[in-house]
Structure formats: structure tokens, C-alpha cells
Amino acid sequence: MPALVCLVDSCAHPVDPAAPVSLCAWHAAVSADWVSARDGVTDLLPAPCRLCGSRLGVRWPSGWLCAVCEWRHGDPIDDELPRPRVDVVYYLRFGDRIKIGTTAQPRQRLAAIWHDELLAFERGDRLVERRRHATFEEERYARTEWFRRSPALDEYVLSLAAGVDDPWALLARWTSEAIARRG
């Protein structure tokens, strides 16, 4: 039986008889490098993830996966399943005041509140919110969830925002983690 030679013109190197394509080891490696440069690369999804809202995806030969929750772009979502509940404590700035509140539906809640900027999200429910209100009680406007800015409050909010470019992306990650835990 004659030895197999590489399919590439002017290459006479031998081919492993078990190889699925008649390429020498060097040409097979070059081909693999070329394919891998495109696949497995993180990039913008063609459209936001319908499950968690992230715009970041990973391109594979079989299609796009959300980089946050790993939903396969284009797959149907079971709309009968309720979205997982993710409670957050939010920190909003309006002028020189900061509001500390909590919600399980931050997009709807924040749309209903006048504010200049979303400063940060903290994972937590009413108990965490009450703890923050107690911690910053001296800065609190009486019987409201609004607080005067102070070095201590500013420092705390900055610590929550450290390393977070977009609080909404953090919320998307928490949501996708809750979906993954649910299975």
C-alpha cells in the first residue's frame, strides 16, 4: 500500500493513516490554528441574550453562546417558567443625595424614580437594605430612603462599584447564575 502524502501542492510530507483528512502534521496544525482563531472568541452577540440581557457572546462552529449564562443564541426560551427572583439593593444619585432601596425588578423600579445616576447594585433583600439604612442613619433624611452624601457613604458605594463597569451587567450575571442554579 503506498504511503499517503499531504494534499497541499508541493508538500510531500507523509500523512498519518488515521488522519481524517490527508494533511501532514504541520498543515493540519496550521489549519487548526486558523479555525481556532475564529471559534471560541468572545464578541458581541448578534442581538442581546433573551435570557439574561447580556450583549457578550462566544462564537462556536455550532453557533453563538451567551458569555454570561451560556444560552444558545436562537434557542427558544420556555416562557412558562418564571424568571428567577434576584433581589438587589440599589444606590441612586440625584443631585447631592443618594437613595438606598431594594427591589426584585430593578428596571421597572428605577424607571419610576427620578435620579441622575445608578451608582451600584448590591445583592440583597429588605434585610440588607435595613442594615444599610442603619449603618448610614446619621446621613438619612428623616423617614425616607434618601441620604446625604458623606465620605463614609461615598466610600461604601465606591467599594460596591469597584471593578464593575456596568451595574446592569452585574445584575445580568446574578440572574444567569440564578437560572443556572435552577437548572
Image: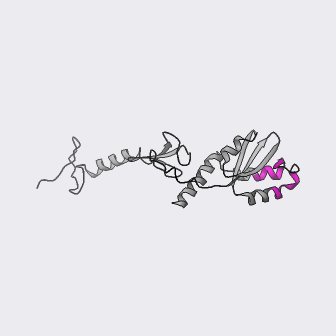
In the displayed image of the protein, which residue is found farthest to the front?
80
- The front one of 78 and 49 is 78
| Residue 127 percent coordinates (x, y) | 75, 60
Q: Say left or right for 101 vs 45.
A: right
Camera sees residue 165: no
Q: Which residues are magenta?
A: 133-156
Residue 27 painted magenta: no
Q: Say left or right for 58 vs 163.
A: left
| Residue 143 percent coordinates (x, y) | 86, 51
Q: Say left or right for 143 vs 27.
A: right
| Residue 1 percent coordinates (x, y) | 11, 56
Count numbered badges in the picture.
0
Which color scheme does this rendered protein use? one colour
In the displayed image of the protein, which residue is found farthest to the left?
1
Residue 152 painted magenta: yes
The residue sitting at 17% across, 51% down in the picture is 4
The residue sitting at 12% across, 53% down in the picture is 2
- The front one of 176 and 104 is 104
Camera sees residue 52: yes
The residue sitting at 53% across, 48% down in the picture is 51
Whether 25 is drawn above or below 10: the answer is: below
The residue sitting at 63% across, 46% down in the picture is 168
